[in-house]
Image (cartoon, helix red, strand yellow):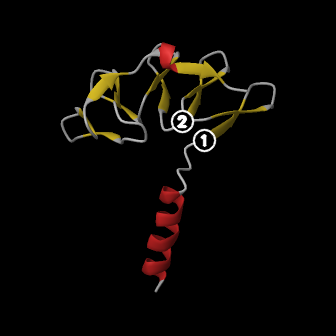
């Protein structure tokens, strides 16, 4: 019964497209974006467009993708080319994406509001 309830509520969350994200900046203010958000090395919050991923790269800069992102064994960040598309590292440290993968880019991010 518990398993069915968990699956039901997970399905509801996925169906609502809950991809918006909010984070707290260095001053304690909450900033939000349409997609996933991340804080850079200076504490500024940057977000992807709706359905997209955001991660801080090895230099402390936030980079984003059209879909969700993952880091490979070399520290490069790759994202799905499909909005809300998943990405994950395999056991060899290579990133696999729903559809094709594309390198994450700072130009796909916007400062959170």
Task: Kindly report which numbered mark, 2 or 1, lies closer to the viewer in this rendering.
Answer: 2
Provide residue 37's location: percent of width, then percent of height. Answer: 58, 32
Q: Nearer the viewer, residue 7 or 28?
A: 7
Q: Residue at x 44, y 71 (%)?
A: 7
Q: Residue at x 34, y 30 (%)?
A: 81
The answer to whether 90 appears left or right of 111 in the picture is left
Provide residue 23's location: percent of width, then percent of height. Answer: 68, 35
Q: Residue at x 48, y 57 (%)?
A: 14
Q: Residue at x 58, y 29 (%)?
A: 38
The answer to whether 71 appears left or right of 50 in the picture is left
Q: Quadrant of the C terminus?
A: top right
Provide residue 13's location: percent of width, then percent of height. Answer: 53, 59
Q: Circle 2 — which element?
A: loop
The answer to whether 107 appears left or right of 22 in the picture is left
Where on the picture, by quarter, is residue 103?
A: top left
State the separation of the CA atoms marked 2 and 1: 7 Å
Seen from this angle, which residue lies furthest bottom? Answer: 1
Label 2 close to label 1 by CB (< 8 Å): yes
Q: Circle 1 — which element?
A: loop
Where on the picture, by quarter, is residue 95?
A: top left
Residue 20 is tagged as: 1
Q: Nearer the viewer, residue 105 or 62?
A: 105
Residue 48 is tagged as: none
Provide residue 104's location: percent of width, then percent of height. Answer: 40, 21
Q: Nearer the viewer, residue 61 or 97?
A: 97
Q: Residues within 10 Å of mark 2 (few under 14, many from 20)?
A: some
Residue 50 is tagged as: 2
């Amino acid at each position: 019964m518990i398993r069915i309830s968990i699956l039901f509520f997970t399905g509801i969350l996925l169906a609502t497209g809950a991809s918006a994200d909010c984070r707290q900046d260095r001053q304690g203010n909450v900033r939000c974006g349409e997609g996933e958000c991340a804080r850079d090395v200076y504490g500024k919050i940057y977000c992807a467009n709706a359905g997209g991923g955001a991660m801080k790269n090895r230099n402390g800069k936030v980079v984003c993708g059209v879909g969700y992102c993952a880091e490979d064994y070399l520290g490069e960040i790759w994202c799905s080319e499909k909005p809300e598309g998943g990405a994950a590292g395999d056991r060899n440290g290579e990133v696999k994406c729903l559809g094709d993968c594309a390198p994450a880019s700072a130009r796909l991010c916007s400062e959170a509001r």
